[in-house]
Image (cartoon, grey):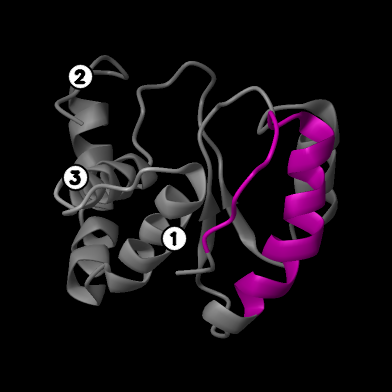
Amino acid sequence: MGPLMRLETTLTGDRYLSILSNRLHSFMPIVHSDGLGQFQQNNATPHTSRVATKWLQEHSSDFRHFHWRPKSPEMNIIEDIRDALLHAVENRSPPPRTPMDLWTVLKDEWCELPPRYLQTLVESMPHRVAALLCVRGGPTRY
């Protein structure tokens, strides 16, 4: 897992491009030195922007990128991770009271996510893709 990033403003294609070039490009070879890692994103507008798409194509030899079909069902495990973080924040006592408190709690909980939980999510991908294929791209329980 990479570091949690806080965005102070709306994510645009240009801001996303900055994240890709400044963070992802250097992170992937460290985490996936064997070259087998894949970068996964969803079809959010900044992710599919011309500048981001062009950058990913230009750097396709640096790491693999898992391509989503447009408007495909949400299959990104980041949704599960987000739910786990939200659940952890809701269970905090006392709850965070300010945006800075929330950011601190989120960073703490991000670092506390059990590696086995994350590995289980990664290992669930073949099952998720098989479920998607069975319903020919329609809704799945994911």
- 56 drawn magenta: no
Give the image location of residue 36, x and y in percent: 51, 72
- From the image, tell me which residue sits under label 3: 87
Say which residue appears at 76% left-offset and 27% top-offset.
Answer: 49
Q: Earlier in the sequence, mark 3 or mark 2?
A: 3
Left/right of residue 130 with respect to residue 63 in the rendered view:
left
Identify the residue shown where x is 38% and y is 41%: 76
Q: What stretch is highlighted in magenta?
A: 4-29
Q: Which amino acid type corresponds to the residue marked 1 in the rendered image?
A: Thr
**Exactly how many numbered labels are in the figure?**
3
User: Which one is closest to the eye, mark 2 or mark 1?
Assistant: 1
Count residues near mark 3 (Cα–Cα under 10 Å), then give few for <14, some for 14-19, many for 20+: few
In the image, 24: left or right of 86?
Answer: right
Label disc, if present, on residue 76 of the rendered structure: none
Q: Name the residue rendered at 26%, 29% in the picture.
A: 133
Residue at the spot x=74%, y=52% of the render? 19
Return the disc, 2 or 1, that comes first in the chain's sequence: 1
In the rendered image, the vertical position of residue 44 relative to residue 5, given as above or below: above
What residue is shown with label 2?
Answer: 135
**Disc with the residue nearer the chain's start (3 vs 1):** 3
Instruction: Report the mark closest to the observer, 3 or 1.
Output: 1
Which of the pair 132/111 is nearer the observer?
111
Q: Is mark 3 on a helix, strand or loop?
A: helix
Mark 2 and mark 1: Cα distance apart in space: 41 Å
Q: Do the residues labelled 3 and 1 touch (CB within 8 Å)?
A: no
- Residue 104 is tagged as 1
